[in-house]
Image (cartoon, rainbow, N blue to C red):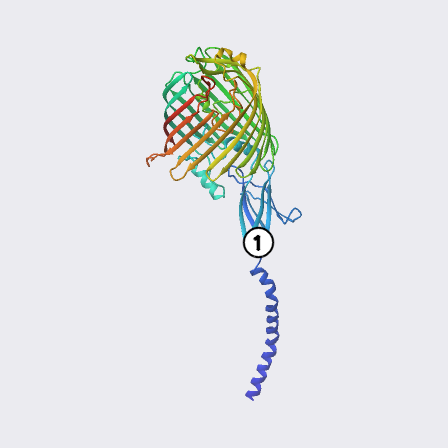
Amino acid sequence: MLLPMRGMMRERARQRWLPAVCAFLVAVASIPIASAEQLFSVDSSIAGRVHDAAGAPLAGALVAVRTGGAEGEDHVAVTDRRGLFTVSDLAPGRYSLRVTKPRFLPTLAGSVQVEPGARLVLTLELQTALDVIRQGVRRGDLEEMKWILRSSPAARPVLHWADAGRDAAASASGVPASRATAAGYLQVYSTAVESAAGMTDTVGSEFAFRLPVASGAQVSFAGQYTEAGNRPTGFTATYDFAPGESKHETLALSMRRGALMEGAYGSGAGEVQVEYDERIQWSDRLVFDYGATIGYTDGAGGRSYLRPELGITWVNGSGSTLSAAVSRRAPVDAGDPIRGREYFDRAVYVPPALERYNHVEVGATYALGRGFQVSVAGFRDEMGTQAFLVDAEDGRRGIVFFDGSGFPTTGVRFHVDRAFRNVQAGVAYTYANAVGFDPDVISPENLHAEASRRNLHTVTARVKTEIPLTQTAVTAVYRWVSGFSLAPVDPYQRFAEYNDPTISITLAQDLPSPKMLPARFQAIVDARNLMEPSFGSRRTVYAGYPRLLKGGIHIRF
């Protein structure tokens, strides 16, 4: 009886579990298709962070990821408060990204390759039209003080002042640490100036210091002192601030004494000037510039003056610009970010009563690639009275004045700028119709009679590089002019650091620095106008461009 009973129990168990096993096998058989898509997914994603030119995250930026060409499908995402975004469920392939936000120029990233199942992480920067213009003025990474040796290899200050609490909070939220830094330099030098007026040797010093005082604002102090009575001494204080997202303002006070034209060279004449500039981004692409310089000069011909300036710039999405400007300012002032040192380095100054400046320029800059720009501009300059030094054939030396207010200079300028690796280089060509004279004229008294309009050509070549092996920075500028002009040819150009003729070379060599001091020591050599031009049977040199050799110690902190 036991055996039949046991067989019956096995049969019943088989009948009970067989449907369950079959159902399980059917379920398992149906799983592989769905689970394979989940476990071996080929879907990809693109994620990233969007920030502004200062590194702050941008919330609400629209990120469009497009497949294929212009007819492709768009996948859209919006950045969160930390500037982060993610676009999921993408098939492997190539994509293009377009990031937009009101008040900012669109940023494009084309031919982004996404691998199967991969997550591509990008960091994208949105710039305003103001950012593009500021980069063009400051020449990219060399955003130092007005008069720092722009060829120095120390593009980053040694001393960094930052709000630790603010930086820590920013780091926790994914925002980069504050970029605000305090930096400066002190330079002690000996200089020799050789011109038609003779040789002048002197020692002196110059300094500059920049201090951030608030978000987006900074104060800069700079100045120069020389022992020579015919070389100027003075200082400049500048306050840069941004009262709004679409506005940037600059207020500067400059003072100098000595070397103003009083009698032969000047004896204690001084000048005080206040400069105000404002740059407003009117729309996403349109920027207005306006400002004025108010000043007063004592001594001979002392008077007050007002020199306004107005400009407009249109910026397209790729960073190319169209601009127009009208100015009655001098070509160089203490706040000039490229050639501000010439405010003190000029050899002879004309009293403001005789200065008359009128400058009109229309130009375009095309960004052909990262670090590669081509520019073209047309200009008209009227410079008023000019002073230059003369070394006559009979040994007489003196200063000759020429009233050029009735002789405007018109011309066109082309230049190509390229930055790659640790080299910045460029070439500029200027064609101008200016007033000149026959170099065979001997007597300076005949200049007005012999002056006539003529076509002049100017070629400028510039190279800036750093030699990593020796930590030596070199800046070389060569400026060739086809003839002698009684007014400066294209003095408002901002292509080269120096407007001196012939060749100018600046060397900055790193020296061993004491570890206990937060500073970098450099030996500097600054040589200007090494191949002083000769005309006729005597040398004739513009007032601002004598042959100059400076050597000293440069301490950066």
- Location of the C terminus (image quadrant): top left
The extreme bottom residue here reads 1
Above or below, 17 relative to 90: below
Left or right side of 169 for 103: right
Q: Quadrant of residue 548?
A: top left
Left or right side of 232 for 489: right
Above or below, 425 relative to 309: below
- Location of the N terminus (image quadrant): bottom right
In the rendered image, residue 190, in percent from the top left (x then y), is placed at 36, 24
Q: Which residue is mark 1?
A: 44
- Looking at the rendered structure, the secondary structure element under dot 1 is strand
Q: Residues within 10 Å of mark 1 (few under 14, many from 20)?
A: some
Q: Nearer the viewer, residue 271 or 84?
A: 271
- The disc labelled 1 sits on which kind of residue? Ser
Q: Nearer the viewer, residue 336 or 468?
A: 468
Q: Nearer the viewer, residue 161 or 69?
A: 69
Q: Is residue 422 visible?
A: yes
In the rendered image, residue 281, in percent from the top left (x then y), is placed at 59, 31
Q: Is residue 557 visible?
A: no
In the rendered image, residue 363, in percent from the top left (x then y), is placed at 59, 29
Residue occupying image coordinates x 48% and y 35%: 424
Number of disc labels: 1
Residue occupying image coordinates x 61% and y 73%: 22
In the rendered image, residue 350, in percent from the top left (x then y), is placed at 48, 15
